[in-house]
């Protein structure tokens, strides 16, 4: 096979076939794959794909060599494939993201071409081959995320901009290979922005190989990357899963793996509350704990591999029954019909009742403590409000990131509200100060948060804390406003299911005399799982279990309804 080209520059990533990220498929596998596509001759300069294209085609190298480069002024060589049986591409082949790099043959050769639909069929029907390809695609994405190849997509903005944070959250939740350029840290902001023809007032900016987006929403960013779902007239999904936290993702994995045509919709991106948890220590099978972001990102990829369509950012605003179907209405007023629905919209953190809070949300006031928010704090003093496990985890994590942390709680101690292991860690950490019987009264700063005034409630004494960020974890409210009128809700807005339904709901004629199935709401064929469900345990493992189990009920419902 092609030997080293002595004149070639070294690529950023070495693609040696002994590396599981760049395996060479053997002859029997290539013979099997040939049934899914066709052979094609290439010449020097033939582009297999260019940055910005939406092709989804799988290429395996049969003869010759293919270079993958950044398609910008740098033209940087990212990886060079030179061995027969190596395949080109990364995770975007599964997520349908537009390419952000360009692949070009370096000389005469041949490739095996497998178009998108056939590639999906291959991944679904050839588990042994699909394991190798899938493992490599995931590993390549992670490598690209950490390499200069990630400069192909840049988000440029201020660390204090909520709009920039929303874009970064979208990119992070979707595991995009991208680079964050913090204007507060960049050496010469004027030159940097001038080089792409934008002004500071245009930021945040997203730069892709084919576009410069000024102040885009996450939805516009997704659209540019080809990740937006446009409902296809006449297409009816078997199962629509609303919410892609642990419960919804588990439902999507099980729905797709059980052969249901499954779509998952989320306002932000895969992850949910778990995605904002720095370390989950009570999820079985991970003795050292796992970050919520990693856990949910893996599950999201698993769901896609099994054939579920994951769509974000995509907010569902209403649900109705119509002629035997369920119709899901999206924020842009488009509609998506389906035969069964799993509601997994979880809960959102309550806001503090403090004047001017909204001025700092995303700019010093946060409802998650991940790497994104921690980096904005840059080791400065922070305040965590709340006495539950999520507050405890946030405090420990932020302290580990070098921030002096104060925790404000209303009670006299943490014992009744926080797990003992977290209480012990907090007590043992000299960087964390616990402020009991304390409430936040006001927030100050211009333009970003600088100080917080708290009150010690028994004495009425006020204290001003220097504070670059306030992390708010004071209990959650269910995300069910969009369900008003579609299913029954309990007093607090959670969704009752099966045995928790009122006698009136259970006896409604639309159940035609049958008992509601496990996780079924007052609307037949609509199931609710995870934190949004009335009486649920509000833990990751419980959410995953419920999401998985509800699919069985959905199957039963679909089988009975024909
Ligand atoms: C910081 C933190 C730490 C935690 N740590 C732990 C822990 O260590 N162990 C543990 O067991 N549990 C922990 N939890 C709790 C755990 O994360 C939740 O119980 C779990 O995430 C619930 O999963 P869910 O899928 O039901 O809902 P969620 O995780 O809340 O996900 C709901 C999803 O629905 C989406 N959504 C909402 N409304 C709409 C709509 N209208 N349209 C489309 N999408 C919508 C949201 O964007 C979200 O992605 C923690 C929670 C937090 C916040």
Image (spheres, helix red, strand yellow):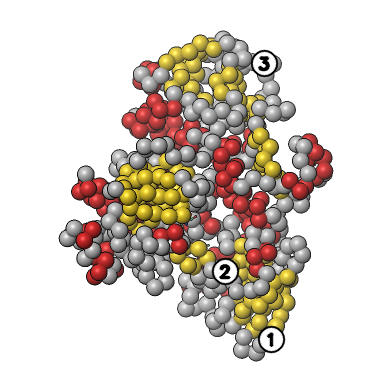
> Mark 1 sits on what residue?
461
| Mark before the other along the chain sequence, 1 or 3 | 3
Q: Which residue is nearer to you in this view: 452 or 400? A: 452
* Quadrant of the drawing holding the C terminus: top left
Q: Is mark 2 within 8 Å of ligand 1?
A: no
Q: Is 216 located above or below residue 101 in the figure?
A: below
Tell me what residue is drawn at x 64 percent, y 74 percent: 354
Q: Quadrant of residue 282?
A: bottom left
In the displayed orientation, state which residue is furthest to the bottom.
Answer: 459
Q: Residues within 10 Å of mark 3 (few under 14, many from 20)?
A: few
In the displayed orientation, state which residue is furthest to the left.
Answer: 513
Query: In the rendered structure, are the residues bearing label 2 and label 3 in contact, judged by CB atoms less than 8 Å apart?
Result: no
> Mark 2 sits on what residue?
351
Query: In the rendered structure, are the residues bearing label 2 and label 1 in contact, judged by CB atoms less than 8 Å apart?
Result: no
Left or right: 471 in relation to 303: right
Q: Residues within 10 Å of mark 2 (few under 14, many from 20)?
A: some
Q: Quadrant of residue 395?
A: bottom right
Q: Residues within 10 Å of mark 1 (few under 14, many from 20)?
A: few
Q: Which residue is nearer to you in this view: 177 or 501? A: 501
What is the C-alpha distance between the residues marked 1 and 3?
74 Å
Where residue 369 sits in the image (x, y, percent)?
59, 60
What is the C-alpha distance between the residues marked 2 and 3?
61 Å
Where residue 290 sits in the image (x, y, percent)?
49, 54
């Amino acid at each position: 096979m092609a030997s080293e080209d002595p004149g070639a520059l070294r690529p950023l990533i070495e693609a040696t076939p002994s590396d599981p990220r760049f395996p060479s498929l053997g002859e029997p596998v290539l013979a099997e794959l040939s049934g899914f596509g066709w052979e094609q001759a290439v010449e020097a300069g033939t582009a297999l794909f260019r940055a910005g294209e939406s092709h989804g085609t799988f290429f395996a190298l049969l003869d010759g060599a293919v270079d993958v480069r950044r398609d910008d002024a740098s033209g940087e060589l990212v990886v060079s494939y030179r061995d027969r049986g190596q395949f080109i591409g990364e995770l975007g082949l599964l997520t349908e993201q537009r390419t952000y790099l360009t692949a070009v043959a370096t000389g005469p050769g041949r490739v095996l071409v497998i178009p998108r639909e056939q590639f999906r069929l291959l991944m679904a029907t050839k588990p042994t081959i699909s394991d190798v390809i899938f493992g490599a695609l995931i590993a390549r994405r992670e490598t690209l995320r950490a390499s200069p190849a990630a400069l192909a997509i840049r988000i440029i903005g201020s660390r204090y901009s909520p709009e920039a944070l929303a874009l970064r959250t979208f990119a992070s939740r979707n595991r995009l290979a991208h680079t964050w350029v913090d204007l507060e840290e960049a050496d010469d902001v004027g030159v940097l922005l001038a080089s792409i023809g934008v002004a500071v007032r245009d930021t945040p900016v997203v730069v892709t190989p084919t576009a410069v987006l000024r102040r885009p929403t996450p939805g516009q960013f997704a659209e540019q990357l080809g990740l937006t779902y446009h409902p296809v007239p006449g297409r009816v999904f078997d199962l629509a899963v609303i919410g892609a936290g642990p419960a919804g993702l588990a439902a999507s994995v099980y729905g797709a793996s059980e052969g249901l045509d499954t779509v998952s919709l989320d306002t932000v991106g895969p992850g949910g509350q778990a995605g904002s948890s720095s370390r989950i220590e009570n999820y079985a099978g991970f003795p050292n704990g796992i970050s919520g972001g990693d856990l949910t990102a893996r599950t999201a990829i698993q769901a896609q591999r099994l054939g579920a369509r994951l769509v974000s950012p995509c907010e569902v605003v209403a649900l109705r029954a119509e002629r035997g179907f369920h119709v899901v209405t999206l924020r842009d007023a488009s509609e998506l019909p389906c035969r069964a629905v799993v509601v997994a919209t979880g809960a959102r953190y309550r806001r503090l009742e403090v004047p001017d809070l909204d001025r700092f949300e995303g700019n010093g006031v946060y409802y998650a403590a991940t790497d994104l928010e921690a980096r904005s704090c840059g080791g400065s003093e922070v305040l965590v409000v709340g006495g539950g496990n999520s507050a405890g985890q946030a405090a420990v994590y932020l302290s580990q990131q070098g921030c002096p942390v104060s925790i404000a709680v209303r009670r006299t101690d943490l014992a009744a509200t926080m797990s003992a292991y977290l209480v012990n860690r907090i007590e043992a950490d000299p960087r964390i100060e616990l402020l009991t019987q304390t409430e936040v009264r006001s927030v100050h700063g211009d333009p970003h948060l600088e100080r917080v005034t708290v009150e010690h409630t028994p004495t009425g004494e006020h204290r001003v804390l220097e504070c670059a960020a306030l992390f708010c974890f004071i209990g959650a409210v269910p995300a069910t406003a969009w369900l008003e009128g579609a299913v029954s809700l309990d007093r607090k807005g959670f969704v009752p299911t099966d045995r928790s339904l009122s006698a009136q709901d259970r006896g409604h004629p639309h159940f035609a005399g049958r008992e509601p199935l496990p996780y079924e709401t007052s609307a037949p064929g609509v199931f609710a799982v995870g934190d949004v469900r009335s009486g649920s345990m509000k833990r990751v493992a419980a959410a995953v279990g419920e999401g998985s189990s509800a699919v069985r009920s959905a199957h039963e419902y679909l089988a009975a309804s024909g």
